[in-house]
Amino acid sequence: MKFTVLSEETNTVLFVITDTKSCWYEHLTNNSLTTRYRACNPTSADQLSADMERWRADKFQQLVAAHSVEAFQDADFSVLDSYDYDLVIQFIFDQPEEWTWRWNLTRMGPRTSANFLSKHLIVPLVLSSHVAFQTIDAKRPVSEQEWEKNVSTTANHAKRSLVHQLKGAFSKPRFVDAIRTIGSALSTIRPASKTHVISDALSSPKISDPVPPISTIPGRAVDNNLPTPSQQRDPPIRKSPTPPPASSQPMDEDASATETESDEDKPSQNTAAERQKPEESTEETRPPKRVKAKVDSSDEDEETRVADTSRKRAPAVRQPVRRGGKRW
């Protein structure tokens, strides 16, 4: 929970509450504070006052004092159902007399909520823990004034260079071990092995040989004696197919002599399938003529043909040209 006074002149306040996952807020001004107080305390005797400005100032100071850490320890609160707001919280205070206050809260967006949690909760907790661990390392009692001085110094340094302060905080082994231990205790996922302590690893690091690969298929062992690229065999040489046997058909003496003289070393490229093809006839073959199917004519077909012929328009007769280039 965070209660902030934005302006004392206009009595403007901001109230934010979070569950470390989401944030809800409400922003009230002077007139809204007066209306809210009267709505929450309808039976109060001091609602009608002659000096309205003084009455508003008193109620504003009363609200600020009620939201302090000491007053909140004795206050009672309850969550109310509402259809108009995301969250409604009602507080009942005892000082100076019993009175009620209600906050009508609206949920922040995810980006604004994350930014608010980072600036107002996460980073302050990290830096405060860092200061506390520095005090423990001092091994001597620290006075309250020295503690406040250390906190103010850390806050001023973080304002100028936040990354440097966070880096210094997370470089402390004890601080990191404490965060890891608390995080593993609150986490729902339990680690299978014991959590490694960073301080022990920094003092005595252990370096071991890499574990050899283990076969994932039962009944099979991994063969680690695989040949290297230099030990791999050359690819097999493909043999060309042997030429087909010579045909038993007789050949002309002139053709065989010419073939023997030109290509004595080369085998014949004519395959058996080509030599077994029948000789094509040299006579010219003409395609058969298409014969039109005879259609029996009837009287109805004759009438349709005559009607189609009569529907054709006669060609237009050209009119003689008048003087001036216009036709009739």
Image: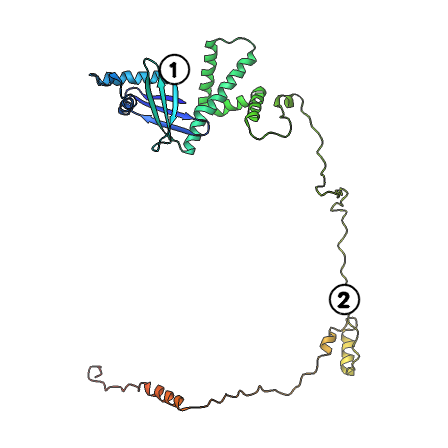
Residue 36: which numbered mark, if any? none
Q: Earlier in the sequence, mark 1 or mark 2?
A: 1
Q: Kindly give the residue lying farthest to the front in the view shown.
A: 43
Residue flagged by tag 2: what amino acid is it? Pro
Q: In this orientation, does residue 130 appear? A: yes
Label tally: 2
Q: Residue at x 71, y 76 (%)?
A: 274
Q: Give the class, few, some or many, for how many residues have Cα within 10 Å of label 2's Cα (few <14, many ≥20).
A: few
- x and y percentages locating residue 39 in the rendered image: 28, 24
Foreground of the two, 262 or 202: 202
The residue beneath circle 1 is: 71
Residue 239 percent location from the top left of the image: 77, 62
- Does dot 2 land on a helix, a strand or a loop? loop
Which SS class for mark 1?
A: helix
Crowding around mark 1 (Cα neighbors within 10 Å: few <14, some 14 to 19, many 20+) is few
**What residue sits 54% from the left and 16% below the top?**
133
Residue flagged by tag 1: what amino acid is it? Ala
Label placed on residue 241: 2
Q: Nearer the viewer, mark 1 or mark 2?
A: 1
Q: Quadrant of the N terminus?
A: top left
For the question of whether residue 161 can be seen, the reply is no
200 vs 317, nearest the viewer? 200
